[in-house]
Image (cartoon, rainbow, N blue to C red):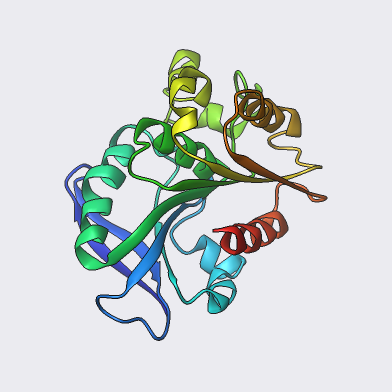
Amino acid sequence: MVKSDFIYSKNLGMDWIYTLCIPDDYLNGKEYDLLIILHGTNGNNRTLVDRVPLGDILEEYKDKIVVLPNGFNSYYIDNMENAIIEDLIPFLEGEFNIKNMIIGGVSMGGFGALNLTLKYPKLFKKAVLISPAIWNPLPPMDSSVRDMYAFGKPFNEDKWIENSWISKTENLSKNSYILIHGNQDEIVERHNVDKFVNYCLDNGIEIEYYNIDENHNSEVVKKGLEIALERL
């Protein structure tokens, strides 16, 4: 079952919409893995449901609940980071009997999921990163993130680095990762992701890396979700 609802977020100062995917045979009190999946740039809480579609994929996974918050174009830092940690997660913990909490994201959401995992490693069992926007060390000059307010106007390169994985490597070993990326990705070219994967492999950090012969598109997202849900 797929439905959307609101919670009030003190950190955002607003009623905050999210979409929830729960098994049709959901039972109160039963333990479920809970996945928080963060959308990409210019998406919303319905993007993965409407475009992938996530609801159909989840028909095979009756032991999992998926929550899709609206992250706007926040890159999931600052107030949005606080909203997820201080508003959304406590709400979910009160609503469901959570076996494991996993965080994942697509593109901008992959950046956010990795950043949150590194800042709050005890909260999450695993991170799923699909086409993650983890340019290293900086986004290219024509990247859309440079025109957003998340990292300041004009774009603050120091703030980008501060929120990137390269500034939090001491916490990488506290979690494990599934990463899916398109070989022909023209938005986040593969060498950016390879740097992260190679760092993990060189330092004994658990990571599964899957390459798909696609660009930065919904096909990678669909296949990535299928791979991740099978592996979790």
* Quadrant location, the N terminus: bottom left
Front residue of 71 and 68: 68
**Residue displayed at 33% across by 69% down:** 31
Side of 123 relative to 39 (left or right): left
Judged from this view, the residue extending furthest toward the top is 158
Q: Position of residue 121 (x, y in %)?
A: 38, 36
In this rendering, the answer to whether 95 lies above or below 30 is above
Front residue of 1 and 35: 35
In this rendering, the answer to whether 80 lies above or below 97 is above
**Quadrant in which residue 228 is drawn:** bottom right
Judged from this view, the residue extending furthest toward the front is 204
Residue 153: tell me if it is visible: no
Q: Position of residue 118 (x, y in %)?
A: 42, 32
Q: How many marks?
A: 0
Judged from this view, the residue extending furthest toward the bottom is 25
Residue 214: tell me if it is visible: yes
**Residue displayed at 71% across by 30% down:** 194
In this rendering, the answer to whether 155 lies above or below 91 is above
Side of 159 relative to 50 (left or right): left
Q: Position of residue 231 (x, y in %)?
A: 60, 58
Q: Position of residue 35 (x, y in %)?
A: 43, 58
* Quadrant location, the C terminus: bottom right
Side of 223 relative to 6 (left or right): right
Front residue of 223 and 215: 223
**Residue displayed at 35% across by 61% down:** 99
Side of 114 relative to 83 (left or right): right
**Quadrant in which residue 119 is drawn:** top left
